[in-house]
Image (spheres, grey):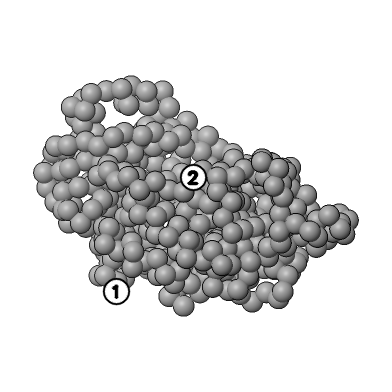
């Protein structure tokens, strides 16, 4: 890499350029705004739409993520639409073993909250618009080229515009353009499944409980969707070969099949929302950092949605970046800063990525005798306080090197 050229010195200059303005990238831009650094956010899609629908997608935030959003100043805007999850119920189809967790056991009001994506996106972008003095929005804009040198990086957009940054942070998803431009590979496992996401209304109240039921095809989950006691988010893991038929089925046929898979704990499903299917794969970047570059969120790791770990892990990436850059000097892209971030995130990423992958493969494995062991495992989890506490602590987001913002700091 050569020293910065005279031409590059005339370009708009930033301390940090974030590529990707989805929920993780926007969260990071919001979190960096008060620190006084000049930040550019590059996002290919237009700003979030304002349309509302009762069957829109949601994200289950654990307690640590709720604390991070509170520290970023957006939780007050999310709270009115956040459905509290006060307990969880984990079971396997055809077996009576159950593992239960409750907020009361953790000394909390809620284990987490199920929040509409639309609400999170709007709250973050409203905060970004308030930070335009230190944050520049390139939206919609696509990254076309990236060149690095000893002092920073030059980013070229598809419209020909160019800018300079001391540090580039890739938050541009599992198919990261930044990773592609740098020639950084990734490890991919295709689960040959899709998550069919919709909403249902049930005849019995959910009582704030999030249900996850494992079946031979994959998990089916029902979570409180709104503060209405009968409205749930439904996430149904479906083999790739069956996705088209389930999407094309009439509402009555789909509901009947979903009821048969989930069971009768919430009574009958009486209304169905719009269905969407999302192919499932695990994609782990070969690196969390490169010269003048960091990877966060799905650009670092994209996980199976089982146990709702992926976005929460990405938000801890965000909190760690903020913490590391708060302690950094004038140049946030020096090797020591990049190494600090990568070292602090490696353990959390390895643990959560391994946990979700093993969970999916364990409960979809039909090896004779293994089903009985799974059943005993659920019973042991429910009856062994130390093990139960360790799993609950992890699911709350407190494991590995927990960022200060996740602890309410």
Disc number lying in front (2 or 1):
2
Mark with earlier residue (2, 1): 2
Q: Do callouts 2 and 1 mark residues in contact (Cβ within 8 Å)? A: no
Instruction: Give coordinates of residue 249: x percent, y percent.
Output: 27, 23
Q: Residue at x 36, y 34 (%)?
A: 276
- The answer to whether residue 132 shows anywhere in this view is yes
> Which residue is denoted by mark 1 in the rendering?
107
Give left or right: position of 147 versus 31. Answer: right
Residue 234 seen in render? no
* Quadrant of the rendered image containing residue 77: bottom left
Mark 2 residue element: loop
Alpha carbons under labels 2 and 1: distance apart: 41 Å
Which quadrant holds residue 335?
A: bottom right
Give whichever of 46, 277 is nearer the camera.
Answer: 46
Please state which of residues 134 and 92 is positioned toward the viewer in this rendering.
Answer: 134
Which residue is rendered at x = 50% and y = 50% of the image? Answer: 22
Q: Mark 2 highlights which residue?
A: 46
| Residue at 53% in and 34% down | 190
């Amino acid at each position: 890499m050569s020293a910065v050229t005279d031409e590059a010195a005339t370009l708009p200059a930033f301390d940090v350029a974030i590529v990707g303005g989805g929920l993780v990238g926007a969260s990071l831009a919001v979190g960096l705004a008060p620190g006084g650094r000049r930040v550019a956010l590059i996002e290919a899609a237009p700003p979030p739409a304002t349309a509302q629908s009762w069957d829109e997608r949601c994200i289950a935030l654990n307690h640590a993520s709720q604390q991070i959003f509170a520290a970023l100043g957006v939780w007050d805007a999310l709270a009115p639409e956040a459905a509290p999850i006060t307990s969880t119920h984990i079971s396997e189809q055809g077996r009576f073993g159950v593992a239960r967790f409750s907020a009361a056991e953790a000394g909390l009001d809620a284990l987490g909250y199920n929040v509409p994506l639309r609400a999170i996106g709007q709250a973050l972008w409203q905060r970004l618009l308030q930070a335009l003095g230190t944050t520049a929005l390139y939206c919609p804009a696509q990254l076309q080229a990236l060149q690095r040198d000893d002092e920073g990086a030059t980013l070229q957009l598809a419209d020909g515009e160019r800018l300079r940054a001391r540090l580039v942070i890739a938050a541009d998803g599992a198919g990261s353009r930044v990773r592609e431009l740098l020639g950084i590979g990734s490890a991919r496992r295709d689960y040959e499944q899709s998550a069919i996401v919709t909403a249902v209304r049930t005849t019995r109240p959910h009582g704030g409980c999030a249900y996850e039921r494992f079946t031979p095809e994959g998990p089916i989950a029902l979570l409180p969707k709104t503060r209405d006691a009968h409205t749930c988010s439904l996430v149904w893991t479906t083999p790739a070969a069956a996705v088209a038929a389930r999407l094309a089925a009439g509402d009555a046929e789909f509901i009947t099949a979903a009821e048969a898979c989930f069971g009768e704990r919430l009574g009958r499903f009486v209304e169905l929302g719009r269905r969407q299917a999302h192919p499932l794969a695990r994609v782990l970047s070969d690196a969390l950092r490169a010269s003048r570059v960091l990877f966060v969120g799905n650009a670092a790791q994209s996980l199976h949605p089982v146990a709702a770990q992926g976005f929460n892990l990405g938000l801890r990436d965000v909190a760690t970046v903020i913490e590391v850059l708060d302690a950094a000097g004038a140049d946030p892209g020096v090797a020591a800063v990049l190494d600090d971030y990568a070292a602090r995130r490696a353990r959390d990423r390895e643990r959560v990525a391994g946990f979700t992958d093993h969970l999916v493969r364990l409960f979809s494995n039909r090896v004779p005798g293994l089903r009985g062991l799974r059943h005993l495992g659920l019973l042991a989890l429910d009856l062994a306080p130390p093990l139960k506490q360790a799993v609950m602590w992890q699911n709350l987001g407190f494991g590995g090197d927990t960022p200060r913002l996740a602890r309410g700091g």
